[in-house]
Amino acid sequence: MPSAAATETPGPETPGPAPSGRRGRPGYDQQSVLNVAVEVFNRHGYDATSMGILAENLGISKSAIYHHVPSKEDLLALALEQALGGLESVWEAPETKEGTAEHRLEFVVRSTVRVLTERLPFVTLLLRLRGNTETERRALERRRGFDRKVAELIEEAREEGTVRSDIDPRTVSRLLFGTINSIVEWYRPGGSLTPEKLAEDVVAVLFDGLRANS
Amino acid sequence: MPSAAATETPGPETPGPAPSGRRGRPGYDQQSVLNVAVEVFNRHGYDATSMGILAENLGISKSAIYHHVPSKEDLLALALEQALGGLESVWEAPETKEGTAEHRLEFVVRSTVRVLTERLPFVTLLLRLRGNTETERRALERRRGFDRKVAELIEEAREEGTVRSDIDPRTVSRLLFGTINSIVEWYRPGGSLTPEKLAEDVVAVLFDGLRANS
């Protein structure tokens, strides 16, 4: 939410005290514009959100937004980068490169839940994309790339004999992502359920099921 | 999809050969209007769908739609009834009234998946509701009633010692519905995965997990 002190000075002629050559102005840097924009995109839908609605929610003028970012689609691209960058960084950890496929899969599930809780509004935006613009389609292609790597890991664990083989691996992959992705619909950070406990719960339910003593 | 023979005769003056006093006209009965309407609601969103868009997709005039149903919100109510009626009928089966809580919960999960696959577009509509109209809010309240009964059954199975107690029952309930409800996002009837096998897979993954030999 914008501070009450945010002014409606029009136009980007005053670059403000941005220290490092980054675009920015007093009260807002690009990241805080992005945080508000993502929240508004998730509330109204990206297509239905105009720069006017964004400006209203930021409490600044439209031209002040253009000072931070050249277009609505660039805002979307920056927001999606935060989701996709976080998800893709999971694969840089050494835990995804060594050990059994079972352990690597558990690590990826746990890390995905962590990224999802840490970057909740950004991943929510990614999961709700319709694919109407080029930016959306590029993001969906990167998301499919992430999903494919998980599917390959499931396949590997299945061949290794650690993941059950009585279910089509595509169904396993769908149910796994269904469980993980649904978290954005209900998880609220700051409550009694920490991201760490949630990640542990998801791994426990997905790998060992709900049944006691299984 | 409307047949090419559907004509654009305006107005409800020709009641057509509806046999039993039900509203209807040649080529369409209320159920087929509903089937098309739900598909259009799911594609564009309920709010964004006008009676004009519906008429275009049905290949009939707006007044011909009013012959079948008095308003867009009535169409929504009829469509949601098909989803909610199906879900609520799960609890009428004797299997929900006798036996261990574990077996009753398994039965409810299996039956819910079956209703979901049999009435896929209707349940999809229900799961995507925003709650902007009175009809939507009433439907969401009925959906919450269904969810509460499942949550009570989870609680019972936990007390019985058949469902794991190291996870908050609210989290269990959220993950269970996350897994089940995500099916609407990817399941397509008529493929190699039958509704029966899917229901079996969901019960297997939810209760015993992905791990082999668990």
Image (spheres, coloured by chain):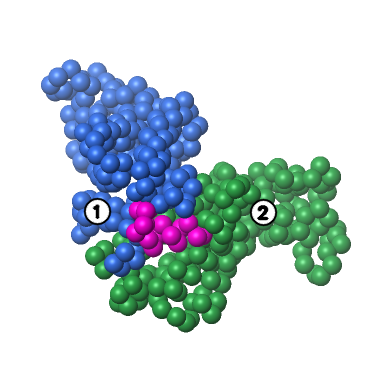
Chain colours: A green, B blue
Q: Position of residue A5 (x, y in %)?
A: 84, 45
For the point 80% across and 70% down, the residue is: A21
Whether tag 1 and tag 2 are in contact, CB under 8 A, the answer is no
Identify residue for label 2: A35
Q: Is residue B76 above or below residue A112?
A: above
For the point 44% across and 80% down, the residue is: A99
Q: Position of residue A177 (x, y in %)?
A: 41, 59
Q: Is residue A21 left or right of residue A125?
A: right
Q: Residues within 10 Å of mark 1 (few under 14, many from 20)?
A: some
Predominant secondary structure, magenta span = helix
Q: Residues within 10 Å of mark 2 (few under 14, many from 20)?
A: some
Q: Please, what is the three-letter code of the amino acid marked with disc 2?
A: Asn
The disc placed on residue B79 is none
For the point 80% across and 49% down, the residue is: A10
Q: Is residue A49 left or right of residue A203?
A: right
Quarter of the rendering occupied by the N terminus of chain B: top left
Give the mark toward the camera: 1 or 2.
1
| Residue A31, visible in the rendered structure | yes
Q: Is residue A131 above or below residue A55?
A: below
What residue span does the magenta drawing correspond to? Answer: A199-214
Q: Position of residue B145 (x, y in %)?
A: 40, 31
